Image (cartoon, helix red, strand yellow):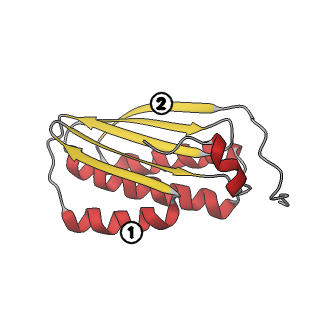
Amino acid sequence: MDHDPHTILAPQRAYAMRLVVPAATELVRPVRLAVGGLASVGDFTIETVEELQLAANELLVVLMTVAGSAELELELQLDEFGAFRMDATARQPTGTVDLDVISVSERILSVMADEYRLEIGDGIVAGGFMRHPDTWSDEDADHLDPLD
């Protein structure tokens, strides 16, 4: 895909998916499939779609470990400028915090996503990541909201 770096991305249709899943590792694969499906609608190469699926996997590993028996609320978004976002939250987590798992996952997320966040606090565990479209340029940055 050729992209003139001086052309700002035109708005496109935005999509969002919301999922609620038990914190069960056997459900990582279906969530990865949903991530890949939504990302494939955007302006991403096959390699980037696979990277987004890997980022989702890492985010879910951390959150499921900490969430324990709590459900995860997931939101997948492809915004009007083509950025892909995944946010996940578990309320009243009952699991454990494994700093080694978090450290490895953070290193992977820092490579696979343009931005990521992990938050573990009183009564909540949350995280998310964002990736710009493959055709994104620095001039497009004014149109995209940062990951909160």
User: Gap in Å between the C-alphas at discs 2 and 1?
Assistant: 26 Å
130 sits to left or right of 37: left
Can residue 94 be seen by looking at this rendering?
Answer: yes
* Residue 53 point in image, percent of width and height: 52, 55
Earlier along the polypeptide chain: callout 2 or callout 1? 2
28 sits to left or right of 145: left
Identity of the residue drawn at 37% across and 51% down: 117
Q: Mark 2: which amino acid?
A: Arg
* Residue 11 point in image, percent of width and height: 75, 35
Q: Mark 1: which amino acid?
A: Arg
Other-residue count near label 1 (Cα within 10 Å), few / some / many at <14 / 14–19 / ≥20: few
Q: Can you tell which mark lies on residue 107?
A: 1
4 sits to left or right of 128: right
Judge whether 20 appears above or below 84 on screen. above
Identity of the residue drawn at 54% across and 43% down: 34
Q: Can you tell which mark lies on residue 122?
A: none
* Residue 124 point in image, percent of width and height: 22, 38
* Residue 32 point in image, percent of width and height: 49, 50
Image quadrant for the C terminus? top left
Q: Secondary structure at mark 1?
A: helix
Number of numbered discs on residues: 2
Judge whether 78 appears above or below 106 on screen. above
Q: Secondary structure at mark 2?
A: strand
Query: Foreground mark, 2 or 1?
Result: 1
Identity of the residue drawn at 38% across and 40% down: 88
Can residue 44 be seen by looking at this rendering?
Answer: no
On the image, numbered disc 2 is attached to which residue? 18
